[in-house]
Amino acid sequence: MPTRYVADRLIVRAVADVESDTVVGMVRERAAARGLELEETAFEEAASRAAASGAPGARPGLAFRILAGEQSTTHGDVWDLLDEVADAVEGEDRRRVSLDHVLTGHGKWQGHGRPVGREPAVFLGPAPRRALAGGASPLTAADGTVRPVVAVLDSGIGTHPWFDEATSVVLRGATLDGEPIGTGAEDEPLYDAEVRGRRRDDVAYLDTYAGHGTFIAGVVHQVCPDAAIMPVRIFGGDGRVREWDLARTLEKLLEFHLRGVAGAAGYWPVDVVVLSGGFYAERPEDDEDYEGVLRGRLRDLRRVGVLVVVSAGNDGSTRPIFPAAWAPRVRRTPDGAIPLSDADLCSDYTPLLPVTGDNPDGTLADFSNDGPWVIAARPGAHVLSSMPTTFDGAELPWQSGDGLRRTVDPDNFSSGFGLWSGTSFAAPVLAGELAAALLQGRVPGSSAVPEPGTDSRVAAAWHAVTRVGDLYTEAPTPA
């Protein structure tokens, strides 16, 4: 389980006064001693953060990109520089500097001697049907009920009958000040992996993770048809996103949410985020206490009432994987997950919610990561969901000599559906259940309708967590 990282960039979770930060100073000093030039990028914090009731100020972040100088005595890989800085600082300061990790999606590709990747399928039942008739806006039903919004941070959502313009299920085209919310690899602009499924015109085979976002959106829609789904594209068909870029995306999503809560035109509140991907820390000693800018961004979202669901990974391991391993430690039982401590459990924000994957018979799938940092298990093996109808790659089926019979075309998804396995697809099951629980609290006459403001949104989010039933028996009471 290797650590994937950006070879020329370090991330520092800085203190408020950056110029007096000993870690920042140490990075600059050690780089200069090696003859390395640094390009520094500061974090752009949400402008509306201070205006949100109860929302704390963000911890600033800095990215240091190494540019090899003329007098450089070493290769431009940051790992050596990280070791030098880590050896020179202690305690909490060590936890504030890290590689820029690369998160990889958690769709599964191979199992114990058998293929478990995506394959075309047929959906014979009726399309998921909304219980609430459409209203004047995709965000509201005819009776005025505000639909829960599930943000799918993934590869986007492609063409599919469930998600066409007439259904008003997908909230396409969301921007912040005219710019996309997703900030993935800006030096190599993202292509849309959900349109053709191929990164370049001269490549005929579907990319490894093409369709990943559409598949996840279909799972959410099956579980909670009345939810509105907001695609936030963070990676392409390679299924990878850099930690720094993801943190910046989350900051932009937070700003979008805060403007929505305030009623700004063109914005809306976000209720649930589902993120199906992760990375392993570079040092075994960091497996339990790794910190980073990304963790702060995820917590900031939860502080303003956004539920965050993440996948647990597909390596069949108990080794902590991030961001899932930032969740509270629990012991899962048939009656629910019992907290092992009060760490990161409070009434001010909901816990991070990692999900592992089960087989169709309810047993833990052979590929699923598990451990005390996993709060829930949901179906994750041989899941049936939506795929872009535009996908038809170069792989060909076997055909009999008389042309009368043929095998399934392995990469033709014109049926609009497929089977796929991975904890990537267990996480949106829980996300849909949470959206359904939020919706139940918003129907006319309910006493749990959230009022505008952060405190009530956090309370409503906690209510949804406990209502789902297998997580905690009750929310922590305010101090």
Image (cartoon, rainbow, N blue to C red):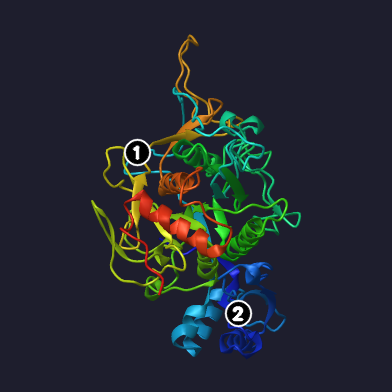
Q: Nearer the viewer, residue 136 or 294?
A: 136
In this view, 140 is above or below 22: above
Mark 2 or mark 1, earlier in chain: 2
**Along the line of sight, the residue nearer the viewer: 297 or 133:** 133
Quarter of the image where the N terminus is located = bottom left
Residue type at mark 2: give it: Thr
Percent position of residue 451, x then y: 55, 56
The total number of labels drawn is 2
Residue wearing tag 2: 74
Residue 280 lies in what quarter of the image?
bottom left
Q: Quadrant of the C terminus?
A: bottom left
Check residue 114 in the rendering and tell me which mark sits there, or answer none: 1
Looking at the picture, which amino acid does disc 1 mark?
Answer: Arg
Q: Secondary structure at mark 2?
A: loop
Q: Are marks 2 and 1 in contact (CB under 8 Å)?
A: no
Judge whether 465 appears above or below 326 on screen: above
Instruction: Categorize mark 2 by other alpha carbons within 10 Å: few (<14), some (14-19), many (20+).
Output: some
In the displayed structure image, the side of residue 70 where residue 465 appears, left or right: left
Q: Residue visible at 50% across and 47% down?
A: 442
Q: Residue 77, how many percent across, how many down?
A: 58, 73
Q: Nearer the viewer, mark 2 or mark 1?
A: 1
Front residue of this view, candidates 79 and 57:
57
Residue 236 seen in the figure: no
